[in-house]
Amino acid sequence: MALRLVSDFDLRKDVLPWLRSQRAASAAAGARGGGPGVLENNYESLRILNVERNENIIYTYKDDKGNVFFGLYDCRTRQNEHLYTFEKDLHVVSCSVNSERTLLAASLVHFTKEGRKNELQPGSKCLTLLVEIHPVNNVKVLKAVDSYIWVQFLYPHVESHPLAENHLLLISEEKYIEKFHIQVIQEDGNRVVLKDSGHLPRERVAEDFVWAQWDMSEQRLYYVDLKMSRSVLKCIQFSADGKFNLMFEAPLDITLSDSGFKLVNFGCDDLQDQKNLSKHLTLCVFTNHTGTLCVCYSPKFDSWGKITYTVFYFHKGHSKTFTAALRSVDSHVTKGLTFLNLDYYVAVYLPGHFFHLLNIQHPDLICHSLFLTGNNEVVDMLPHSPLQSLSGSLVLDLCSGKLYRAVLNQSYLLQFLWNTQLDCEKMAVLHCVLSCGRDPQFLEAKLIQWISENVSACHSFDLIQEFIIASSYWSIYPETSNMDKLLPYSSVFAWDTEIPGIALVTEEIPLPFMKVHSFKGYWEKLNSNLEYVKYSKPRLLYDNSMIRKEWHSLISEEKTGRRRSMVYMRNIRENAMKVISNLEARNLEPRLTPLFQEEDNHQRLLMGLLDLICQILETSWRKHHLHPQLLHCSRRASAAEFTVFHLMTRILEATRTLFLPLPPGFHTLHTMLGVHCLPLHNLLHYFDNGVLLLTETAVTRLMKDLDNSEKNEKLKFSIIVRLPPLIGQKICRLWDHPMSSNIISRNHVRVLLLNYKKQPRSSMIDKSPGSVEFLPLNYFIEILADIESSNRALLAFEGHDNVDAKFVEEAALKHTTMLLGL
């Protein structure tokens, strides 16, 4: 399953055993009322009421007389606590407890006499009570009205000391929200009582709204206001001192006026029409620490053959409306859409039909999201009962009374990656796995293993490019603030291929209007995202033009012989050595791949994303059981070396397009494998087209290792004529062959004659002992000898200290002999 639900709480396992033990203790003590003395056949009345900010869970249950008991489960200590008992047959609408567990707020109504157990009489009185529970003392009536009331204590972010004042929200079905200020005092030790129970100050927070959502973790209230004849989303942020601010207003292009009254995450209330979820709209707001603001919306179902839902990416300035085709036209949707917050992702789930994992960090391309349908294992991965998404990836199953923590299933995603055939799914799963980030080295190793066996499997994008960019991005993203706006997150900037089973329409939307101008934390990041969208039109995308310019400048400098300042070069190389040493220090065992063995000016000057490439090569070498000592030029290549050579060629292609640096030694290793694997004409074609680079280290090794057979002579000569002059002069001295001597002689003569001025000479030529009777050669050698004796300074260049006119004469005679076939 792509999504894994880890159980944090289960009513049946975490509460029932405690209730049974309390019942047994009460029976033994002869207790009557006041405690959790429930009967066995009333355990079905046990249900969750609320999950507070500290993840404490409030639940209720009844005895055989209908008395209502409130209990609390502490998720940190895994302990239960009895809070309070109402010795009346009441139905609990809502409940909340303050952070010190000294005050309990509850909203209750009476049952009908003739109706079923969970039906409420229209117009029945709803009592909202405030109870002192530490110890049990006074009960104060906050509201006694005909409409329903929901309650929620505010939880300050500072919980290290008892608070002198508590703050309680009352949400009325009459479409207003009030905040009560409740002052408490301690007396007689730990006894906590209301300071002035006769008068509790209150203030109006919001009114004339039709929808509201509570964010328990961040203490935020979202609501939709219909005052202006259109839907406007507003957000109120509550602070630790109880003050609150309207943070933003954002227009929503949705219709809510005829949808009735709807609350989200204000406790776990069964009055919110759970039976007919599929017939009503769904609306929820999701945020995360990076400054994202998503509004997920699903209207009433108009067609059974398809379902539509919209996600407003306010932090990106656009919305996406998805239309998913159901498996058959007569498919019957019995459950509503479920939206789940998964940090960097939002999951959209329709039981029995589809599962859509939306990338909310980078929603621009649909290929960064994963849409799964048709497979029962996939589309039935979550419970079919109504699910409630809370803060921090918490998911509440109301029917079963279980609280889960939703996490992406890395094992399933990796397995799915091996089996899927669609490029869009490979792209989506690759990013999804890397975003998990719980064990980056393990995940990268698994992905590298997959890439090494599927390097040519993707047609819509370069798999190596995408892995290098995505892995680097997701590894640095959690630790950066705004760097994600500068770093590339994908190698793909456009995606025209359709995703099977789903259609998409993208529209620009108005940005939220920030009402507060002093930002901290999340609000600072959201404002930064909004400013970026506002002032970066058209959208700014990563451009490697600066790296491309630097790269071409380095190549040009090498060809012309010009060099930058010694200080600049020294600093760059020192930084490169630090990078390499850090990479080597991270490895617990020595590398098999023979990299970092040479001075590679290009790569050291553009040092960067090296470790991923090293890992890819290292994984491939270990998989194919290669060893550095296997690279002998005299033997034929194995099938394993062919495979690694192909992989290195793909890496080179991927990095060259994006101008990404390679580890020093990469080109040498690539060339050595190429000599093993390719026929001569193919090898030379690779050289001429820049696929293989003739580094000095590689050519030196070839000259030393290869004998002078006819085949190797052709190879050596073909390589030497392709080398830059300075490197060629060095390499020729390593090859004991007439052809090499001829090249050395030609270079020597070229340098001598570069500034030669003809001088009058005697017509008689002195013959030295052993001189050859070949007058043109004799005359030419005499001129060279004369220049050598008159200007030794011209000969002071590297690699020619043992070259003179005599050497030139001998080389010329050998070359002539070869040409004449003598």
Image (cartoon, rainbow, N blue to C red):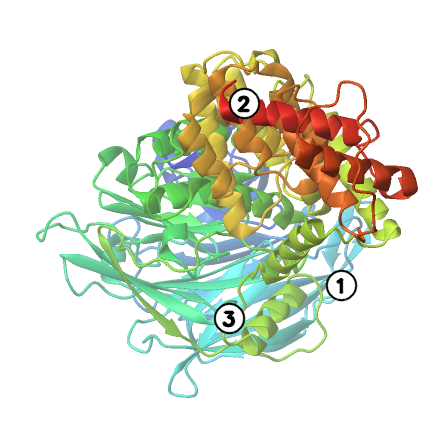
Q: Which element carries disc 2, helix, strand or loop?
A: helix
Q: Nearer the viewer, residue 678 or 610?
A: 678
N-terminal of the pair, mark 1 or mark 3, is 1
Label pair 1/3, CB-CB below 8 angstroms: no
Q: Is residue 501 visible?
A: yes
Above or below residue 236? Residue 469 is above
N-terminal of the pair, mark 2 or mark 1, is 1
Seen as rendered, the residue at the extreme bottom is 228
Q: Nearer the viewer, residue 41 or 649?
A: 649
Left or right, 409 with reference to 783: left
The quarter in which the N terminus is drawn is top left
N-terminal of the pair, mark 2 or mark 3, is 3
Identify the residue at image location x=72%, y=46%. 605
Which kind of residue does numbered mark 1 sit on? Lys
Q: CA distance from mark 2 to mark 3?
A: 66 Å
Above or below residue 756? Residue 774 is above
Which kind of residue does numbered mark 3 sit on? Arg
Above or below residue 418? Residue 370 is below
Left or right, 337 with reference to 812: left
**Residue hosting label 2:** 818
Left or right, 569 with reference to 267: right
Quarter where residue 532 is shown: bottom right
Which kind of residue does numbered mark 2 sit on? Met
Q: Nearer the viewer, residue 206 or 792?
A: 792
Q: Which mark is residue 195?
A: 1
In the rendered image, residue 24, in percent from the top left (x then y), is placed at 50, 22
